[in-house]
Amino acid sequence: MTVRDILKMGDPRLLRVAPPVTSFDTDELHLLVADMFETMRAVNGAGLAAPQIGVDLQLVIFGTDAVNPRYPDAPLVPRTVLLNPVITPLSDDMENGWEGCLSVPGLRGVVPRFSSIRYTGFDPYGDPINRTVDGFHARVVQHECDHLMGVLYPMRIRDLTQFGYTEVLFPGLDASEDD
């Protein structure tokens, strides 16, 4: 397993729309997933999208088995590998919440997201995934899937007075965790 470099905002590769995965259960795909989990773990990420490491595929990973130091008050989200995701909002209800991003280091902002969603897609073996979620879990999925469409969370911020440096906004958090 390899810790991959994470692209930073400003890199044009983060703005591309990723094509779907067409080959499941391959050695190459399993190695990519393992590298993504190793990369996410190394930087205490809540999730990671393949485009963030320069791979143009509709593949996101998210979740951990332990509390995330970047989001210490957030509930646990099950460790998931999701390919070719489709998100369906279950209502028009939106929630504002603070987000950070490994591709936007050191910053956080308030982003509106659908409160509850259904997401479908496939695991690395090509088996279907179909889940209904809300709260932080729904936020993480929407954030990661935005990367597949070339959208970074600052593009969704409606009030720029609620966007700034983690060390200023959240002095109790270790700002180096956002790098």
Image (cartoon, rainbow, N blue to C red):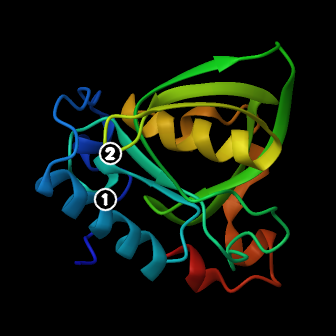
Residue 105 image offset from top left, x and y in percent: 50, 67
Residue 122 image offset from top left, x and y in percent: 41, 33
Secondary structure beneath label 1: helix
Q: Which residue is mark 1?
A: 33
Residue 79 sits above or below residue 157 on the image: below
Residue 6 visible in the shown view: no
Q: Which residue is mark 2?
A: 124
* Nearer the camera: disc 1 or disc 2: 2
Given the image, on which type of amino acid does mark 2 rest?
Pro
Evaluate if marks 1 and 2 touch, with contact meaning CB atoms under 8 Å apart: yes
Which one is in front, 154 or 61? 61
Q: Quadrant of residue 112?
A: top right
Indicate which disc, 1 or 2, sits on the residue closer to the N terminus: 1
112 left or right, relative to 41 = right
Residue beneath the point at 60% across and 60% down: 63
Circle 2 crowding by C-alpha within 10 Å: few under 14, some 14–19, many from 20: some
Given the image, on which type of amino acid does mark 1 rest?
Val
